[in-house]
Amino acid sequence: MSTEQDKQQSKEAISMIEGLLQEKFRNKSEFNSYYDKDGAVTIKSLANSDDSTVVVHTYNPSEVLWWVDRKTYQDEYDDWENKSIGTYYQDILEFFVETDQLDAIRGLVEAVRMRRMVPFVGAGISKDYNKEYLLWGQALTKIGKKLALSSEVEKILGQGNFLEAAQLLFDKDSIQFINFIQTRFSTKQADNNDAKAVSLLPEISHGCVVTTNLDDVLEQVFSERNMHFIGYMHGTQAGGSFVSNLTRGKRCILKLHGHANDQHTHIFTEGQYNCAYGNPVNFSEDLPKTLRQIYISQTLLFLGCSMTKDKTLDLFQNVCSDNHFIVPQHFALLEQPKLADITSKTESRLLQLNIQPIWYPNEHHENVLRFLELIRDASSGKVTI
């Protein structure tokens, strides 16, 4: 190989490395702007201009430091990031201190560090992703209106009997019912480019994800990060290699109510629940047996769930009552009720199931995203709580 070829290859290699370093520098644009706030660095030129005025070269301080001493640049960046993170979380941490919840959050952070945290995702998370997704009560109300059963459905929902309402509507017109589910919970894109709480889940969970949702929001978000689910279980559907991947700690998803696009997996009427879970609960059936396994072996974090009494909590109560298993600590992020009495009663009910509520301020749903960011940064050591 000739000397000229060697020189050309060296130039190309240097150019590639410089390009990569420049891209890395640009990725820290927020810090660079902060660091450059006091003005540019000037260097006097040895040459004079035609009119004999002094010529100076102007550079941003961040750029000079990056190319001259990257270790010092990184030290400055780390110091800035730590201060920025502390300021960002200051108000929410103050709330957790005032409400005596830091110990609970530390327990959750430890579960994330140990890669044992399993998100249990409810409809509130999908609705945050795209407002066209409906909470279950909203969906039943809309179907009731469509099938001219509004008053009956409202009465049943008012008593908290979601399964009974779903059964009434399904019996009235199963074709319309199924079509509504398939169309309203079909694939949708995020409302806008704002960060969504669900976008944080790939950063804090490493294995199984459980959801009551019929949509494929979770699949979309994880796939965008190249973190595809390699095992699945939709309702009672077999053949998705869910259990084998669960036991191996691989990424897998359990959709308790099935998938919107496959009516044979749906579980939301009283009859479908009884068939899938048994009445009373039969732990020889695949779905309750699998859910029990997750409940006794992992740390669940309930997100976007109302945590009102339902079949899932009934199953957990059944497991606790048997006293055959040591149930680990679980967590539920919930909006704090306006009335202290309701807060206390909800806490007592959930603590019986080893589910520790973590409250965020009433009507401040943006704190769901900030809470997950805090968990991510605390578990990675970026912030100390």
Image: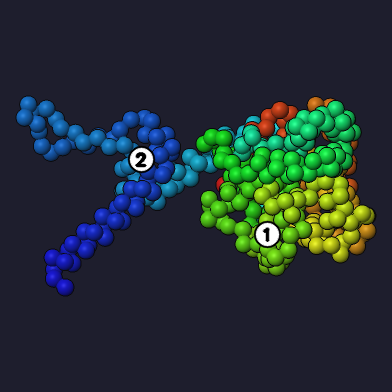
- Nearer mark to the viewer, of 2 and 1: 1
Which residue is denoted by mark 1 in the rendering?
232
Residue 197 visible = yes
Q: Where is residue 215 in the image (x, y as percent from the top left)?
A: 66, 46
N-terminal-most mark, 2 or 1: 2
Q: Which mark is residue 17?
A: none
**Horizontal placement of 27 versus 92: left or right?**
left
Task: Say how many tags the image has.
Answer: 2
Q: Which of 169 and 20 is in front in this view?
A: 169
Which residue is painted at 34% across and 44% down in the image? 65
Q: Quadrant of residue 114?
A: bottom right
Which residue is denoted by mark 2 in the rendering?
62
Binning the other alpha carbons within 10 Å of mark 1 as few (below 14), some (14 to 19) or many (20 upward) gives many
Q: Which of 273 and 248 is in front in this view?
A: 273
Residue occupying the far bottom of the picture: 1
Which residue is painted at 45% across and 43% down in the image? 77
* Quadrant (top left, top right, bottom left, bottom right) of the N terminus: bottom left
Q: Which of 197 and 331 is in front in this view?
A: 197
**Horizontal placement of 160 versus 103: left or right?**
right
Q: Where is residue 328 in the image (x, y as percent from the top left)?
A: 80, 56
**Horizontal placement of 273 versus 233: left or right?**
right
Q: At numbered mark 2, what does the secondary structure look like: helix, strand or loop?
A: helix
**What kind of residue is marked 2?**
Ser
Q: In which quarter of the image is residue 4?
A: bottom left
Q: At numbered mark 1, what does the secondary structure look like: helix, strand or loop?
A: strand
Q: Which of 222 and 110 is in front in this view?
A: 222
Q: Is 97 located above or below residue 208 in the figure?
A: above
Which residue is painted at 61% across and 37% down in the image? 130
Q: Position of residue 310 (x, y in %)?
A: 85, 44
Q: Where is residue 353 in the image (x, y as percent from the top left)?
A: 86, 49
